[in-house]
Structure formats: C-alpha cells, structure tokens
Amino acid sequence: MDTIDFRPTTTALAQVVAGIGEADLAGPTPCPAYTVGDLAEHVVGLTTAFTHAATREPLDPSLMRDGDGTQLPDGWRERLAADLDALADAWDDPAAYDGLTMAGPIEMPAYEAGLVALDELVVHGWDLARSTGQDWHPDEQAVAACTAFVESFDAPANTDGGLFGPPVAVGSDASPLDRLVALTGRDPAWAPEHG
C-alpha cells in the first residue's frame, strides 16, 4: 500500500506552532468553542494519538488531550515540533497502513486513520495560522488527499461550535485549500476580530 508523505505538512505546522505567541493563546479560532490554546492542545493530543495509531504501540490514557489550553505543558512548542517529526516518521513506514488500528478510542482501517491524521494536521494548521496571522501553504498533494477524503463522507447538518461543521459554499474559482476548509465548515475568509 502507498504511504502518505506527512513530512511537508508536519514541517509547515511546526513552523506555525513556533510562531504562536503567548498573547495568541486566548484568541479565537474558526472553531467557535476553541481558543488558539485549546486548539494547540488538541493538536498536541492528536499528534500523539495518531503516532501510536501508526506504530500500534499502546497509548497511555494520560496522554489523551481534550482541547483545554490550560493543559499545554511547558515547552509545548518544542515538544510538538518533535512529536510532529515522530508522526511523519511513523507514517513513513508502509506497515503503518496495514490492517486495523486504534485512533484514540476508535478502531478503524489503518489507511483511513492516516488520512484522518493528515486531514487534522492540514485543517488545524490552517486554523492556527489564520488565527495568529501566519501564512499556511500546505503540500498540494496533502490538500488533494484530504479533500477527496472529506468529500467521501456525509456532511454534518449542524455544528456544536466544535472542530468541524457543515460545508460553507465557495465559488468555482476557490483555491484547493479554500475548498478543503470550506468542506470542513470553515469560511475561507475567516479572520479574528480585533477590538
């Protein structure tokens, strides 16, 4: 089975994470119920969970994160950069895509878990970059893979303010990245309000 090249996405996300300042952590994101800190903490947790999904190593439940920015550990930016690197290494192994695996508490086909992980990184990378005024230029192949994956599911009918919502309409001239974020319930023109 073909592997997915996570490295361009994890490298780009690590750069965005490095650019998140302490003052940014309380700011809003395109996910209405999440601050930048909450979303960063969610990314810390999903990076760990999906690395374990690839390696099949048991995941210590204490490593599961619930998207609470107050739980960001000291040195989280550097730790997350290293964890993103480990995630890319784990999914570079063809064996990661074989059979079933656990993604957190959910069992799923391993190849699908890889696509979920990539989609989380690409979309939340956009969320964090947009929320903190940074550029986000993910790998084109990753965007195409995520778009095909998201299109394969029924769209949610409503949102609870969480991480994904019903699709947002975009024009036929929308960029591939704008199409992807719109499919996940985000307005590609979203920007934080400044008081």
Image: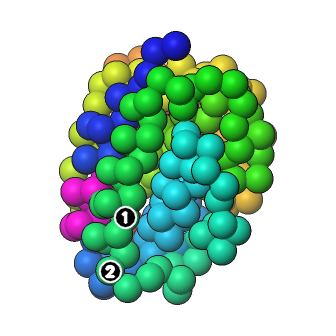
* Image: magenta residue range: 13-19
Residue name at image x 54 percent, y 31 percent: 96
Q: Going by the picture, which residue comes out furthest to the top?
A: 1
User: In the rendered structure, which amino acid carries the disc numbered 2?
Assistant: Gly
Q: Nearer the viewer, residue 78 or 159?
A: 78
Q: Position of residue 67 (x, y in %)?
A: 59, 70
Q: Is residue 69 left or right of residue 10?
A: right
Q: Position of residue 28 (x, y in %)?
A: 46, 71
Residue name at image x 71 percent, y 44 percent: 102
Q: Position of residue 146 (x, y in %)?
A: 49, 28
Lower position in the chain sequence, tag 2 or tag 1: 2
Q: Quadrant of residue 59?
A: bottom right
| Colour logic | rainbow
Q: Which mark is residue 5?
A: none
Please say if 113 is above or below 195.
Answer: above
Q: Is residue 59 left or right of residue 20?
A: right
Classified by dominant secondary structure, the portion drawn in magenta counts as helix
Q: Badge 1 is on which residue?
A: 80
Q: Badge 2 is on which residue?
A: 75
